[in-house]
Image (cartoon, rainbow, N blue to C red):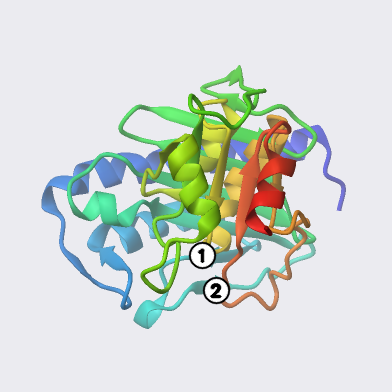
Amino acid sequence: MELDHGYLSSLLETAIVAARLAGQRAMEEIDYIKASLKSENELVTQADALCQKIIIDRIKETYPDHGFIGEEGKEGKLFKQAPRGDEQVWWIIDPIDGTNNFAHGMLLFVVSVAAIYEGIPIAGVIFEPATESMYTAVKDGEAQLNGRRIQASEEAMDKFSSIGLDSHLSADENVPGWARKIIKETRYRNLGTTALQLAYVAKGSMAATITDTPKLWDIAAGAIIAESAGAIVTNWHGDKIFPVNTDNYQGGTFQTLTANKHTHTELVKLLNS
């Protein structure tokens, strides 16, 4: 399959429309939240599945034979539907990234939609409906925010830089030494939405973000946006995360480091010290 500019632009436009429709619906639903336990550590609301369906239905209007991996399936599991045609494209969907924020009426949440081909993101959209912020990128293209180019910063890790941290730093009560160093020496942040933190690295608002347990739908769109902006996306050892095996993916997590080029090497060393 040839990934020419026209095809990638069509994927991106479809993702933009789908994400905006879902985000607008989420904003309508936020005053009528019904939250329940999805798992021991996760909440889900009525809007999650509703917004996911909006996204999938919109994408299927243009690409009926593409595959889908979404966060919201039956009985707390993922939603998965394999591609049926020659175009082996998978859409990776997080209808509301930041569900815990959303469930408490906080406007800090995003819609994340990515297209993956041969295990690598080729188009990605992160939409923050509360601010009408649309982060986008396609393979070999530039990262944009509302149609304007964005770039990762050249900021070093210091007392003025913002470093994003996962809210689930450890399974026990002991905060890791590397996290204590970041907490002490930087303006560390946790927004409650992994995808938005990756987008903030892409636009230079954060020097880096470190996440312990994100799933594919948390990072797929953010990865292509961040890398298109000049950031580096790896696991904690500095190895590439993509390509991933979408055929076999069942909801596993990826320890992810997304950082500008000036902090990535330093953070890899810190994470493995």
Query: What residue sits 49% from the left and 36% below the top?
Result: 185
- Crowd rating for badge 2 (residues with CA inside 10 Å; few <14, some 14–19, many 20+): some
The spot of residue 102 in percent (x, y) is 25, 50
How far is mark 1 from mark 2, CA to CA? Answer: 11 Å
Q: Find out whether the residues at labels 1 and 2 contact each other: C-beta distance under 8 Å.
A: no
Q: Amino acid at mark 1?
A: Thr
Query: Depth check: 166 or 175 in front?
Result: 175
Query: Residue 256's mark?
Result: none
Vertically, is 167 above or below 69? above
Name the residue furthest bottom: 75
Q: Nearer the viewer, mark 1 or mark 2?
A: 1
31 left or right of 159 in image: left
156 left or right of 31 in image: right
In the picture of the structure, the residue carrying the numbered disc 2 is: 251
Which element carries disc 2, helix, strand or loop?
loop
Vertically, is 249 above or below 151? below
Which quarter of the picture shows residue 38?
Answer: bottom left
Which element carries disc 1, helix, strand or loop?
loop
The spot of residue 16 in percent (x, y) is 52, 37
Name the residue furthest top: 148
Query: What residue sits 67% from the left and 58% below the top?
Result: 273
Query: Depth check: 148 or 205 in front?
Result: 205
In the picture of the structure, the residue carrying the numbered disc 1 is: 213
Vertically, is 264 above or below 150? below
Residue 196 seen in the current view: no
Q: Amino acid at mark 2?
A: Gly
